[in-house]
Amino acid sequence: MAKRDSSTRTIEELDEKCKLLLDVIDERREVSVQDVVSRAVRKGFKDYEAARALHKLKMKGLVDLMDPEPPRRFTSYLTSSRCTWFWLLTFIVILTILTIYVFPQITPFIYLRYALGSIFVLYLPGASLIELLYPKEHDLSQLERVALSIGLSLALVPLTGLALNYTPWGIRLDPVVAALSVLTVALALGAAFRKYLYHKLKHGV
Amino acid sequence: MTPDKNFMFALVLGILMALTTPTLAALGEIRLDVYVSLFTLEYFAAKAILRPRLRVRDPVAITLLFLFLLIVALRVMEVLGVAPLS
Amino acid sequence: MGCRSLERYNCLGISLLAFGATVTPFFYFIMSNVPLTALGVSIMILGAVMALTPINPVPKPAVRGLLEGAMLSLEGLLEELDLSERGYYVAHEDGLVYVYVPSSKAEPPNVDSKPRSLVVELKGQPYLVLIPPASALAREYPSTSLEDAVSTVLVDLAELCSGVRVAKGPGYIRVELKRPRGRRAPSRFKRVLGSLEACVTACLAASALKRPVYVSSEVEEKGWRRVTLEVA
């Protein structure tokens, strides 16, 4: 569902397509996205142009997209498209484990292992912690998120190694992979729950 | 009455450092950089969770971050065989 | 800069910092003892944190008392004038937030300039103009994030609740207040301006968004109060 925001922000800087689409969405009326796109297509838009213009308007805050049936429980929230990032993260963790233990250690799989291993160690732990600490989209910009994710990963991974050093398992491949996988997924699950709490508040479910 | 979060931050940080130092000493750790690295991580973790307000921009965080990066750089150089870290 | 100009807590912090800075080199270079050196470093860090902590000159119960006193005063005025319609929180260029209370059901006021009298007439509709309890706080504690601003005022400054969560939707803002502990607002004040916590939140929202805001509903559930603000 799309709803036009009745703010007095200037629309002069918008391109023609965005201005046309803004006229399609009546002031203060709620219309479905499908309706908006089909009306835009009748005015000469291609469907992807309409979708792109709608996205630009959303980014500028001139329209807001609402889910008519938002998920109510955490399990349904976790399985909705809002948690695609969580499943993508989990998939990369699982794929990394597969490249280490299952895939043959020959070209090109070895390069895949290098690439995924770098992401697994240098990005994912910090990214999941950042999502936990700053669950709202507008808390940080994308660039800040990426930079902080790398920085926090550099802090979390040695800390994990330090903790493993004092355990019977020590700092070897299997304990490190297990510890980092559990840590990353646990932090991501915590982040998903925090996001769910804000989702519940926003949609009043 | 909930304690002020600035006091909580100082209290939590104090407890964490008070636990870390004797624990590492009991484990026989004699590298100062390990202590400083853990203090840095504890500081940032406590700051991220409790979010205290400070009078000015955080000079403690900047100093600890600089020291942490220095320690990491020296360790990497040691691993690469360029410079030993005592 | 003597200790008189700083709070004792900050003075203690400076003392610890100085103590740590003195003993740390001694432990490292003279005694060659790493754990004691680490202890000296930790004392320095703790001292620096304590020295940099701002101390509230006005205790939290006093801030809460001042807000509640202002609330009771406005209740008297609203009762005398027999007003019970929802008020609209509007921020003006002087940084203060004013509440426009219509005499009868009315649309949000379209106001360009600061009000010059207690009663103003806009498009034939008279409005009583009030300065709500948290109006000046909204000017003193601006923030890019509404959640941070509400948390600073409600939790840190006045201790009116123990936690805050803010979510924005199209044309509305929902705020969840954990364990609100303000005095129960008098009925007329609550009908016109909302509870004390809602009033403070609406002031900060109007100041942050620079758009009229009103308290649309308040729901209490299991130690939480959910306040919905509509943005005009």
Image (cartoon, coloured by chain):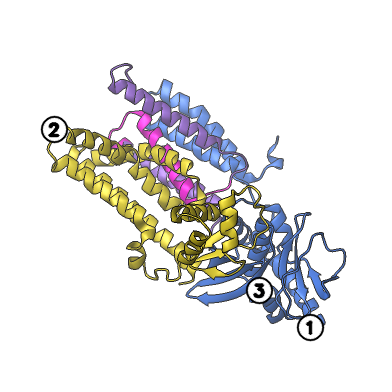
Chain colours: A yellow, B purple, C blue
The amino acid on which the numbered mark 3 sits, given as a three-letter code, is Gly
Tell which subunit mark 2 falls on. A
Q: Which mark is residue A106?
A: 2
State which quadrant residue C122 falls in: bottom right
Can marks 1 and 3 be said to lie on one chain? Answer: yes
When the figure is inspected, residue C83 is found, relative to residue A148, above or below; the finding is: below
Tell me the element at label 3: loop
Tell which subunit mark 3 falls on. C
Is residue B60 part of the magenta span, yes or no?
no
Front-most of C45 and A12? A12
Front-most of C64 and A76? A76
Tell me the element at label 1: loop
User: Looking at the image, is mark 1 or mark 3 earlier in the sequence?
Assistant: 1
Front-most of A118 and A34? A34
Q: Examine the residues drawn in magenta and state their main secondary structure.
A: helix
Tell me the element at label 2: loop
The amino acid on which the numbered mark 1 sits, given as a three-letter code, is Asp
Q: Is residue A136 left or right of residue B71?
A: right
- Identify the residue at the far top of this view: B82
Label 3 sits on residue = C194
The answer for how far apart the CA atoms under marks 2 and 3 are is: 68 Å
Residue ID at (59%, 41%):
C52
Label 1 sits on residue = C82
Q: Bin the neighbour count of mark 2 within 10 Å (Cα to Cα): few under 14, some 14-19, many 20 and up.
A: few
Kindly tell me whether residue C180 is visible in this rendering.
no
The amino acid on which the numbered mark 2 sits, given as a three-letter code, is Ile
**Magenta region, residue range:** B25-53
